[in-house]
Image (cartoon, rainbow, N blue to C red):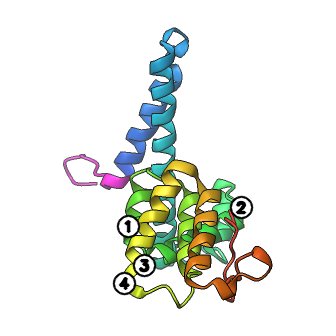
Amino acid sequence: MSSSGVRFDHPAVEAVAGIAACLDDLQAASVWSMPAGELAGLLVAVEVVARRLDAARVELTAQAETARLAEREGATSLAALLRARADVPPSATRERLRLRAALLARPATRRAFAAGVIGQRCAVAVCQALDGLPAQVPAAMTGRVERLLLEVAAEDGAAAVVRAAAGIVHRFAPDDWPGGRPAPASGTRWRCGC
């Protein structure tokens, strides 16, 4: 606080306060009188905002880990800190950190997630699918494959991403398809894992 008594909050703190105020307004609004089309549009808009908030939580969780927040706050881990203070399951914290690490190599997926085009489950599915591509997929095609998987994710969801990735594996490495199922690379899960 300065000597003039003016308080300064970080812009991120002010943004979250603004989001909370807007949510209060939304919850106080009488939506019963909205025409069905407007209500449908509102519902979709809220889903997009929720995805964007999920992306922000992933980024903030990673920043807290980088800043060693748990150590500074006297907690054994960030997962333990968030469990104690915000009732976040430790598995959710670990998943956010894994996703953020994967997104560092996937800027298009990161942008789509941040914009609310795809949700967290789809971001995980796209990253896992790209990490599990066989060596036979030319490196020059990885960007095109990522864009394809993002389109599939935006239109049809995480399960469709897994199916599309399996089709790519079959196309480039049909020998890795024993018994009609794709053989994942070691350590790769072909399910969404969310």
- Neighbor class of circle 2 (other Cα within 10 Å; few <14, some 14-19, many 20+) is few
The residue stretch that appears in magenta: 1-12
User: Which circle, 3 or 1, is nearer the viewer?
Assistant: 3
- Neighbor class of circle 4 (other Cα within 10 Å; few <14, some 14-19, many 20+) is few
Dots 3 and 2: beta carbons under 8 Å?
no
For badge 3, the amino acid type reads Thr
- Whichever of labels 3 and 1 marks the residue nearer the N terminus, that label is 1
Give left or right: position of 80 versus 169: right
Q: How far apart are marks 4 and 1 (CA)?
A: 15 Å
Q: Mark 1 points at which residue?
A: 108
Q: Mark 2 points at which residue?
A: 89
Q: Which of 33 and 16 lies nearest the eye of the viewer?
A: 33
User: For the stretch drawn in magenta, what is the main secondary structure?
Assistant: loop
Dots 4 and 3: beta carbons under 8 Å?
yes
Q: Distance between the residues labelled 3 and 1?
A: 11 Å
User: Which circle, 1 or 2, is nearer the viewer?
Assistant: 1
User: Which circle, 3 or 2, is nearer the viewer?
Assistant: 3
Residue 130 percent across, percent down from the top left: 52, 76
At numbered mark 2, what does the secondary structure look like: helix, strand or loop?
A: loop
Dots 1 and 2: beta carbons under 8 Å?
no
Q: Distance between the residues labelled 4 and 3?
A: 6 Å
